[in-house]
Image (cartoon, grey):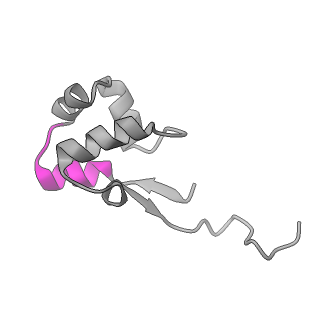
Amino acid sequence: MPIHVTLSVVLAQRNVRAKDLAAFVGITEANLSLLRRGHVKGIRFDTLERICAYLQCQPGDLLTYAEDARAPSAGDEG
């Protein structure tokens, strides 16, 4: 998938424990771990908002886009 989660990097940069973030956001540590590893299909905007508020960051600090070389481009015909 071309969306990569960089939450672990931001946590390390800010010296924040995942346990503290999970408690503030109101999600389980297990779900936060899945998010950190990019093993989720989506994230609710209110969850993203609370993470950003706690870490004092922007959503773009937590998520990056890198084009997937395997995906066909818009101009390719099937």
Say above or below: 63 vs 45. Answer: below
- Within the magenta stretch, is there residue 46? no
* Residue at point 41%, 35% (across, down): 34
Quarter of the image for residue 63 reads bottom left
Q: Number of labelled discs?
A: 0
Above or below: residue 26 compared with residue 48: above
- Residue that appears at 70% across and 64% down: 71
- The x and y percentages for residue 25 are 26, 31
Q: Is residue 67 left or right of residue 18?
A: right
| Residue 45 image offset from top left, x and y in percent | 42, 40
User: What's the residue at 57%, 54% (across, down)?
Assistant: 1
Q: Residue at x 34, y 34 (%)?
A: 33
Question: Residue reaching furthest bottom?
Answer: 75
* Magenta region: 7-17
Residue 46 picture location, percent across and down: 37, 36
Q: Quadrant of the C terminus?
A: bottom right
Left or right, residue 5 beside residue 25:
right
* Residue 71 versus residue 75 in the image, above or below: above
Residue 9 is one of the magenta-drawn residues: yes
